[in-house]
Image (tube, coloured by chain):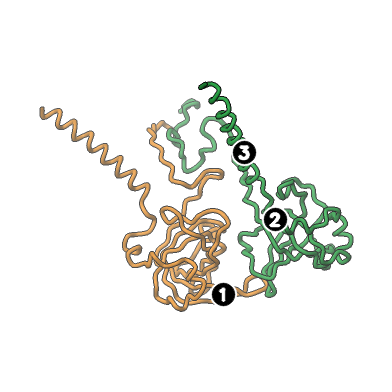
Amino acid sequence: MLQRYERFRWRRGVLMILLWLMAAACQPVLSETIRGQADTAFPPGELHADPEKYIGKIILLGGTVVRVTNESTRSVLELLERPLGSRLEPEAGDVTLGRALIVFDKTLDDQIFYQGRKVTLAAEIVGRETRPLDETTYTYPLLKVREYHLWPVAAEGYSSDPQFHIGIGIFHGF
Amino acid sequence: MQSFLAQPRSTVSSIRTILLVSVLMLQACAHPISQNLRQQADPTLTFAELLENADGHRGEVMVLGGTIVATRNLASGTEIEVVEKELSSYGEPSLSDDSRGRFIFVHPGYLESALFSKGRSVTGAGKVLGSRLGKVGEREYRFPLIAIEEIKLWEEYTQYPYYYPYGYPYGFPYYYPFYSPFFHPYHHNYR
């Protein structure tokens, strides 16, 4: 009787681990704390219309990297903002809300933040900044990063949707 | 009686299916440029003729497309330099290397150069503005200018990776369930 009970507990443990793994695969990419502080109902287009109206507000946004620049006192990520899909992942395709500048304290490596890579951020609206763009100028909303998530590089031709495989690895000598 | 009824009903349903399928096919092949604008275009005006004498065709409507060389954001708007490609019946530029030259799409507003980026296919239509002397490399080139009224950015053509059997293209990060960098089942261990 006791043996059967023990076996049942073992199975339940495996089930718990499996559930935990599945839940981990679907977890949001930004911390609960920052998601609590952010205004998740902030309409995405508003940022580009009048950022100065919302100074101090923390929002969630994402898109693809246009470029990163390391200046003497700050580093700036130029973001092509895109609508966010499930798990706050920026959507692929040709829909954009506009460009935005995100200020980082740390140095940004352009080999990590390379052009086209997807990034999701929680950032505080600081104001706006006009910069030269090609042969004209562009007025960007300016934000300060609070938290960010870089999306993994999807193998070419593969969807970036979560892949869930269960495998058994065998370690073999060298 | 029943078989008599069954006959026309199945005909109706198959006609319906054919109609539905053809509507879907038509939608898939819909030309991105409005019919109105396409009808204004003179089908006898060729790109070769435009290259030769763009200024002589000022104001005429043309439907053109090709591969983007560069998108320039200017104070006055946006210019897209395009390598001209032949258009299919539904307006998509061919992906071949056949081209008769370059032209420039002119747009008064802002177009996102990160989307209208080098190598992507674009189809546009509008009036011929004339030409402008520019450069391709170090040689002078007379670019025909088109003031676009409609433009379509075609979906990116994704080149699929080489398709080997046996679990490639499962590269890093090793999605393939049995893959381990230390596991070489078909190699002998010579140690």
| 1 or 2: mark nearer the eye | 2
| 2 or 3: mark nearer the eye | 3
Compute the Cα span from label 2 to label 3: 24 Å
Residue A145 falls in which quadrant of the image? bottom left
Q: Is residue B117 left or right of residue B51?
A: left
Say which label, 2 or 3, has the lower sequence index.
3
CB contact under 8 Å: marks 1 and 2: no
Which chain is assigned orange?
A
Q: Amino acid at mark 3?
A: Leu
Q: Is residue B7 left or right of residue B31?
A: left
Q: Which residue is mark 3?
A: B19
Image point 51% across, 66% down: which residue?
A77
- Chain to which mark 1 belongs: A
| 1 or 3: mark nearer the eye | 3
Which chain is assigned green?
B
CB contact under 8 Å: marks 1 and 3: no
Across and down, in percent, residue B170 comes to 51, 38
Secondary structure found at label 3: helix
* Residue B190 position (above or below residue B138): above
Secondary structure found at label 1: strand
